[in-house]
Image (cartoon, rainbow, N blue to C red):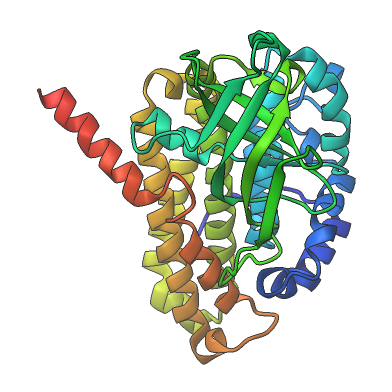
Amino acid sequence: MNHAPLTAVTPQLATWLDANAEAIDAGQELAPQILPQLGRAELFRIGVPGQLGGLGGTTVEAIEAVAGVAGHSLAAAFVFWGQRTFIEYLLQSPNEALRTRSLPMLLRGELAGATGLSNAMKYLSNIEPLQMNAAPLSGAGVTAGWTLNGSLPWITNLRREGFLAAAAFDHSDGAPPSIFAIPHDAPGVIRSDDLDLIALRSSNTAALKLDGAVLDASWQITADARAFLVQARPAFLGLQCGMSIGLARRALAAVAASSAAVRAAVDGEASRLAYDLDALSQRLFDGIRHGTFLAAPATLFEVRIGLAALVDAAVRLEVQAAGGRGYLRGPGGAARRTREAAFVPIVTPSIVQLKNQLAQHRQAQAA
C-alpha cells in the first residue's frame, strides 16, 4: 500500500498531540494550549512570504502541514485551519496596516484568527444571505466608521485569551458587502459559551454576536467581499481539505500496521483507498498551484466531496481492521477518529450544500 507519509510535524508537537489527542477531542481543558503549541512548531509560517515573517513556500505546503496535524488530532487541525485561513485573508488583504500590526502575533500563535466567513462562502454560492449588517456612523462619512450588528452561530478558534474574527457584512447604505476583522475586546462583541460538540471540544468553537460594535476602516479586510471571497475560496477550502487528507492517511496507516492476516483480508480495499487518496490529493494540489479553481470552483467542490467520502471509508476500514479493540476507548484512537470523521461532511460548506451547488452547476451547463 503506497500512500504519502504524514507531513513532518516536529517531534515535540507530535508527542504532545499524541499524548493529549483524546483529551483535546473530549474535553475543553487543553483548549488554551493548542494555538501556542502549533505556533512554537512554526506551522503558521508555512506558505507565508519570508518578508512578512513566514517560512516561504506555497498554500500547498500549508495544506500538507494541516494534514500532518490532522493525523494526530483533527481538533488541533481544525484550530490550525482557522488560524491559517485567517492569516491567508490578511495576506490577500489590501489593508497593509492591519496586516502589519496583526500578523506577527498570529504567526506566533499568541493571537487567534477565527475565520467567520462560512456564512459568507455560502452567500457567495447563493445558499444563504449575509447575517451581519454594517451601518455608516451618522453624518460621519463611510470611512469614519460603522456600527456593526448581527450574529454567527458557529465560529472556530474564538480563543478566550484573545481573537480576531473575520466576518462579512451587508451595508445598510447600499455599499457592496465588506469584510471586517473583529477584535475580541471591542465593545459590543459578545462570545457565547463553547458549543456542546460531540467531539473536537477543545477547538474554541462558539457563537459570536455583535450588538452595536463600532469599527473604523483600520479593521476592514476588504471593501469588496464578493471579489475577495472568490480569490480566497481556493485557500479556504484547500486548507480545509488538508484535514480530510491527514485523517484518511492516519486511518490507512493504522490498517497497514495491522496483523498479516487482517492486512490480507482488507488489502484490496485499502490499496484502492490509498490510490484514490493520492489521486484526489494531487488533483487538489495541482488546482491550488495552477490557480484553476479560481475560474472553476465546481472542480474544487468535487475534490472536497470526494475526500469526505474517502475519509468515511478509510475510518470504517480501520474499525474493521481493529476489531473489538476499535470499540475501546484509549490510545489506539480508532474510536476518536470515527467521531472526527463524522465532522468532515458537516464543516461549512457542508457536503450536502456542495452537492446542491454541483447539481445547480450541471443544470446551468445543460441549459
Q: Identify the residue at the far front of this view.
A: 139
Above or below, 221 against 119 in this view is above
Q: Is residue 61 visible?
A: yes
Tell how many labels: 0
x%, y% of residue 211?
Answer: 64, 41
- In percent of the image, x 64 and y 16: which residue is there? 138
Q: Is residue 132 left or right of residue 202?
A: left
Above or below, 278 against 52 in this view is below
x%, y% of residue 318?
Answer: 50, 73
- In percent of the image, x 46 and y 50: which residue is there? 277
Q: Is residue 111 left or right of residue 230?
A: right
Q: Is residue 164 left or right of residue 261?
A: right
Q: Nearer the viewer, residue 178 or 254?
A: 178
Above or below, 200 against 318 in this view is above
- In percent of the image, x 59 and y 14: which residue is there? 223
Q: Identify the residue at the far bottom of this view.
A: 324
x%, y% of residue 155?
Answer: 61, 49
Q: Is residue 101 left or right of residue 323?
A: right
Q: Identify the residue at the far left of this view.
A: 367
Q: Quadrant of residue 123?
A: top left
- In percent of the image, x 55 and y 36: which residue is there? 117
Above or below, 362 against 3 in this view is above
Quarter of the figure that contains the C terminus = top left
Q: Is residue 65 visible?
A: no
x%, y% of residue 362?
Answer: 19, 31
